[in-house]
Amino acid sequence: MDRIVYERMAAHDTTHWWYRARRDILADYLIRWGGLPKDACILEIGCGTGHNLPMLAQFGEIDAIEIDETAGAKASERLGKPVGTSPLPELVGVEPGSYDLVAVLDVIEHVEDDVAALKAIAAALKPGGKILITVPAHQWMWSAHDVVNHHKRRYSKAGFEALLAKAGLQGRKLGYFNSLLFPVAVAARFAGKLMGKDDSDDSPPPKPLNTLFEGIFRLERHMVGRVPLPPGLSLIALASVKA
């Protein structure tokens, strides 16, 4: 990702509505559907500044990987130990069969060979282990945001399911999220394109809007995995190796 993306992440990952609400949604999703053992061994790949690590830590012992040096240093502070630096799909230093859960949260879209990346992640799982995956949805939503984040692609629901199958995985509780605000996002993105506006700035909106968006998005914690949500900005799945 461009340096400015990491700088904004570090500045806003505790206050921005998207980060705050998404952590709550992912935590509830894991509580309901994760089926993790007590004190699970967990790895987050592409942890950025480490803003998800405290949330994941409630489920077990955490390791992390981040290839950006500056973001990785911030993550190491939050984790209390060094994070790894090996990129996907190599994952040098990650022992096969080591983890009950691997989290790749808006990461796979950055990797050229997404199938190889998921196969490498699957090799790191213990028997019965799971991969928590989120990816951005809808290629037609492509914009400057994707460019500065160095995305290779966005995914359709069918394409996401096909990716998991190619990697020898089966996805449970697969569906959209960030759906309640999707019409607002679509309108804003197309209005921006018509006006030639750059939407790459991920700084939070004014506080009243930030609070409103956070509250709306957080409502999805009661829905994701329970009911099929309409199209949203993201896709989520809990994947495991096919039997």
Image: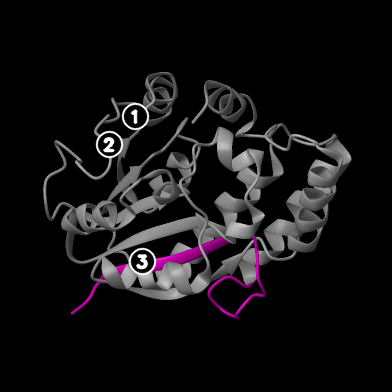
Q: Earlier in the sequence, mark 3 or mark 1?
A: 1
At a point 65% along the width and 70% down the height, the residue shown is 231
- Mark 3 vs mark 1, CA separation in Å: 23 Å
- Between 123 and 145, the one nearer to me in the picture: 145
Residue 235 is covered by the magenta coloring = yes
The answer to whether marks 2 and 1 mark residues whose Cβ atoms lie closer than 8 Å is yes
223 sits left or right of 35 in the view: right
At a point 69% along the width and 38% down the height, the residue shown is 16
The residue indicated by pointer 3 is 163
At a point 46% along the width and 41% down the height, the residue shown is 54
The answer to whether residue 218 is above or below residue 20 is below
Q: Main secondary structure of the magenta part?
A: loop
Q: Earlier in the sequence, mark 3 or mark 2?
A: 2
The answer to whether marks 3 and 2 mark residues whose Cβ atoms lie closer than 8 Å is no
Q: Which mark is residue 67?
A: 1
Q: Amino acid at mark 1?
A: Ile
What's the coloring here?
Answer: one colour
The residue indicated by pointer 2 is 87
How far across and how far down the image is residue 35, in percent? 34, 70
How far across and how far down the image is residue 52, in percent? 48, 42
Q: Quadrant of residue 220?
A: bottom right
- Dot 1 falls on a residue whose secondary structure is loop
- Dot 2 falls on a residue whose secondary structure is loop
Name the front one of labels 3 and 1: 3
The answer to whether marks 3 and 1 mark residues whose Cβ atoms lie closer than 8 Å is no
141 sits left or right of 37 in the view: right
- Decide if residue 30 is in sight here: yes
Q: Earlier in the sequence, mark 2 or mark 1?
A: 1
Q: Amino acid at mark 3?
A: Leu
Magenta residues?
Answer: 223-243
- Mark 2 vs mark 1, CA separation in Å: 6 Å
